[in-house]
Amino acid sequence: MPCITIQITREKATIEQKQKLVSGVTKLMQEVLGKDPKTTFVIIEEVENENWGMGGELVCEGLKS
């Protein structure tokens, strides 16, 4: 029973985009590892830019430049 967590910054991903992520990851798990899609869990966590760092600084600071 795999559980996959996808973390993205909170930048208005649409329901349709999230559905594509869930479908794509589920299909990939089935194709690569033979996992049953019915027992594959996918969690999408949206993280505020102020709680996400990249390149040594917070993403929200980089957006100010």
Image (tube, rainbow, N blue to C red):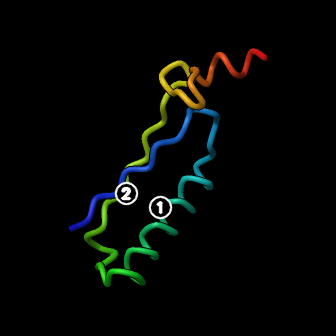
Residue at x-position 63% and y-position 46% = 14
Query: Which residue, given by chain and number where applicable, does mark 1 sit on?
Result: 22
Amino acid type of the residue that numbered disc 1 sits on in the rendered structure? Val
Query: Which residue, given by chain and number where applicable, does mark 2 sit on?
Result: 42
Residue at x-position 29% and y-position 73% = 38
Residue at x-position 33% and y-position 80% = 33
Cα distance in 3D space between marks 2 and 1: 6 Å
Left or right relative to 60: residue 43:
left
Residue 1 sits above or below residue 35 on the image? above
* Residue 15 spot, x, y in % from top left: 58, 49
Question: Which sits in the foreground, 3 or 52?
Answer: 52
* Residue 9 spot, x, y in % from top left: 56, 35
Residue at x-position 47% and y-position 61% = 22
* Residue 41 spot, x, y in % from top left: 31, 60
Residue 34 sits above or below residue 25 on the image? below
Element carrying mark 2: strand
Q: Badge 1: how crowded within 10 Å, few (<14), some, or many (20+)?
A: many
Q: Badge 2: how crowded within 10 Å, few (<14), some, or many (20+)?
A: some
* Residue 11 spot, x, y in % from top left: 63, 34
Q: Are marks 2 and 1 in contact (CB under 8 Å)?
A: yes
Residue 47 sits above or below residue 15 on the image? above
Q: Quadrant of the C terminus?
A: top right
Element carrying mark 1: helix
Amino acid type of the residue that numbered disc 2 sits on in the rendered structure? Val
